[in-house]
Image (cartoon, helix red, strand yellow):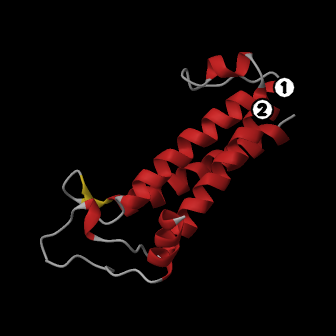
């Protein structure tokens, strides 16, 4: 109960909104993240759900999964495929959101990678809708 109370209190009244020192970029340096990261994270997870649903619909129509790691999961139930796909995406999004302020590859912030993932998912969904509407 104490952990839940502390989590709620820290969520609604965070103490650190930015690093204490200019060179501090550690993951634990900040306990508050801008609401835009929640919105981007939610959009990515919703896009992942949409992609899983569209993939299952396309496979029913004779298409195949291009991702060799996910293709074996389609042999069983579609729900296992969806749970694994959405779970992996959600886990990755949580990690990237926590690292949003840190620079990746020495140049760009991880937050830019989140936007890139969202754009890629959007393009994939448009492509899948195109495949569904094809004769």
Question: Percent from the top left, x then y, of residue 117?
Answer: 49, 52
Question: Percent from the top left, x then y, of residue 55?
Answer: 73, 34
Question: Percent from the top left, x then y, of residue 79?
Answer: 76, 31
Label 2, residues with CA under 10 Å away: few <14, some 14-19, many ≥20? some
Label 1, residues with CA under 10 Å away: few <14, some 14-19, many ≥20? few
Gap in angstroms between the C-alphas marked 2 and 1: 6 Å
Which secondary structure lies at badge 2? helix
Point 22% across, 76% down: residue: 19
Q: Is residue 64 left or right of residue 119?
A: right
Q: Which residue is mark 2?
A: 56
Q: Nearer the viewer, residue 52 or 14?
A: 14
Point 76% across, 45% down: residue: 129
Q: Which residue is mark 1?
A: 60
73 over 107 or under it: above or below: above
Q: Nearer the viewer, residue 19 or 40?
A: 19
Point 77% across, 28% down: residue: 78
């Amino acid at each position: 109960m104490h952990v839940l109370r502390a989590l709620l209190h820290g969520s609604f009244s965070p103490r650190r909104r930015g690093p204490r020192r200019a060179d501090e970029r550690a993951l634990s340096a900040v306990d508050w993240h801008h609401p835009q990261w929640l919105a981007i994270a939610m959009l990515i997870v919703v896009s992942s759900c949409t992609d899983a649903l569209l993939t299952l619909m396309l496979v029913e129509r004779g298409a195949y999964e291009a991702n060799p790691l996910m293709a074996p999961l389609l042999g069983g139930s579609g729900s296992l495929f969806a749970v694994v796909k959405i779970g992996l995406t959600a886990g990755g999004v949580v990690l990237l959101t926590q690292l949003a302020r840190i620079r990746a590859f020495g140049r760009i912030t991880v937050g830019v990678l989140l936007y890139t993932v969202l754009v890629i998912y959007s393009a994939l969904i448009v492509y899948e809708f195109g495949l569904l509407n094809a004769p």
